[in-house]
């Protein structure tokens, strides 16, 4: 739920980063792997990469950005010190892909429970 709320802008990224950094490393790796899956399900595209790097706030020279530029989503195997950057980048990629999917395929309504999230106060 948290990842969908972050992708849809219902929670600020700073809050998501704080949540993510509070997890144990093995949990962080599972979250990163879930984000990779969600990006695939949302039909992320290689052409989304530059915008996701920009939106994430990480530098294009950081390892996760370089990996993603090569259209490699296998970031859960990166060193622990790269996990937060990977998280930021994948949330941004997921956000871009999911927004497009909602606009193109779900605009008239859909049954995806994650597209029916209430706006947080």
Image (cartoon, helix red, strand yellow):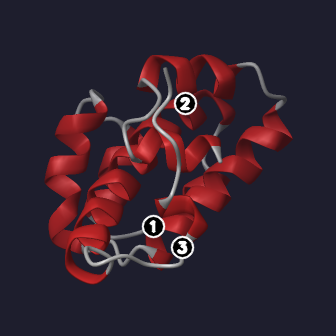
Which residue is at the front of the view, 90 or 6?
Answer: 6
Secondary structure at badge 3 equals loop
Task: Judge depth for marks 1 and 3 and give the one in front.
Answer: 3
Which element type, helix, strand or loop, lies under badge 1?
Answer: helix
**Can you identify the residue that label 3 sits on?**
112
Residue 94, image x and y in percent? Answer: 40, 57
Compared to residue 74, the image places residue 105 above or below, namely below
Disc 1 to disc 2, C-alpha distance: 17 Å
SS at badge 2: helix
Q: Disc 1 vs disc 2: which is toward the camera?
A: 1
User: Which tag, 1 or 3, sits closer to the chain's start?
Assistant: 1
Q: Earlier in the sequence, mark 1 or mark 2?
A: 1
Q: Label 2 to label 3, Cα distance in Å?
A: 28 Å
Q: Residue at x 49, y 20 (%)?
A: 121
Residue in the picture at 57% in, 46% down: 3
Question: Circle 2: is it few (<14), some (14-19), or many (20+) Cα within 10 Å?
Answer: some
Could you tell me which residue is drawn at 55 percent across and 60 percent down?
114
Q: Is residue 25 visible in this depiction of the protein?
A: yes
- Image spot of residue 105 (x, y percent): 29, 83
Q: How many marks?
A: 3
Q: Are marks 1 and 2 in contact (CB under 8 Å)?
A: no
Note whether residue 61 is visible.
no
What residue is shown with label 1? 39
Question: Toward the viewer: 32 or 100?
Answer: 100
Q: In the rendered image, which quarter is residue 119 located in?
A: top left
Q: Is residue 23 above or below residue 61?
A: above
Label 2, on which residue? 84
């Amino acid at each position: 739920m948290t990842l969908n709320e972050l992708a849809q802008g219902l929670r600020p990224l700073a809050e998501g980063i704080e949540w993510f950094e509070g997890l144990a490393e093995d949990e962080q790796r599972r979250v990163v792997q879930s984000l990779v899956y969600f990006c695939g399900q949302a039909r992320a595209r290689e052409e989304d990469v530059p915008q996701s790097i920009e939106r994430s706030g990480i530098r294009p020279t950081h390892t996760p950005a370089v990996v993603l530029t090569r259209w490699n989503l296998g970031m859960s195997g990166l060193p622990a010190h790269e996990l937060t950057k990977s998280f930021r980048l994948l949330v941004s990629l997921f956000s871009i892909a999911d927004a497009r999917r909602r606009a193109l395929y779900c605009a008239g309504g859909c049954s995806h429970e994650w597209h029916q999230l209430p706006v947080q106060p």
